[in-house]
Image: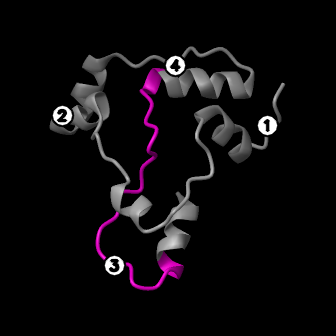
Amino acid sequence: MVHGIYYLLTTNGLSGPFNMVSPYPVHNEQFIASLAEVLDRPAVIRTPAAAIRLLLGESAALVLGGQRAIPKRLEEAGFAFRYFELEEALRNVLNKPVA
């Protein structure tokens, strides 16, 4: 995301809203599994949907169902994503080499 924001700030002629999202979305369970793999720890975090609804109310729909946002304008502006796989991105951010 930082790379995307930097790109928008340093590229002339860009203005207005941009979706700062990956073109390759994953569900929370996939994210937790990938993070556990990278950290070499068990994936034991599970939050029941009812608890999320209780805490977030109407906003829970965004967390549970996703926003279905795509980075169309960002890609049209010439931005190139560095990582196509979640695990690769997590390994880079967390400085964890491939096992």
Mark 1 or 2, closer to the camera: 1
Q: Which residue type does callout 4 highlight?
A: Ile
Mark 1 or 3, closer to the camera: 3
Q: Earlier in the sequence, mark 3 or mark 4?
A: 3
| Residue range highlighted in magenta | 9-29
Q: Earlier in the sequence, mark 2 or mark 3?
A: 3
- Does the segment drawn in magenta span residue 33? no
**Image position of 83 with respect to 65: above or below:** below
Q: Place residue 85 in its image quadrant.
A: top right
Q: Where is mark 4, residue-wise?
A: 45
Alpha carbon separation for disc pair 1 and 4: 21 Å
Q: Residue at x 33, y 78 (%)?
A: 15
Between 31 and 82, the one lying in front of the other is 82
Helix, strand or loop at label 4? It is loop
Q: Which residue type does callout 1 highlight?
A: Lys
Image side of residue 64 versus residue 78, left or right: left
Alpha carbon separation for disc pair 3 and 4: 39 Å
Q: Earlier in the sequence, mark 1 or mark 3?
A: 3
Q: In the rendering, which numbered label is found on residue 15? A: 3
- Mark 4 in CB contact with mark 2 (< 8 angstroms): no
Alpha carbon separation for disc pair 1 and 2: 36 Å
Q: Where is mark 2, residue-wise?
A: 57
- Does the segment drawn in magenta span residue 27? yes
Mark 3 or 4, closer to the camera: 3
Alpha carbon separation for disc pair 1 and 3: 36 Å
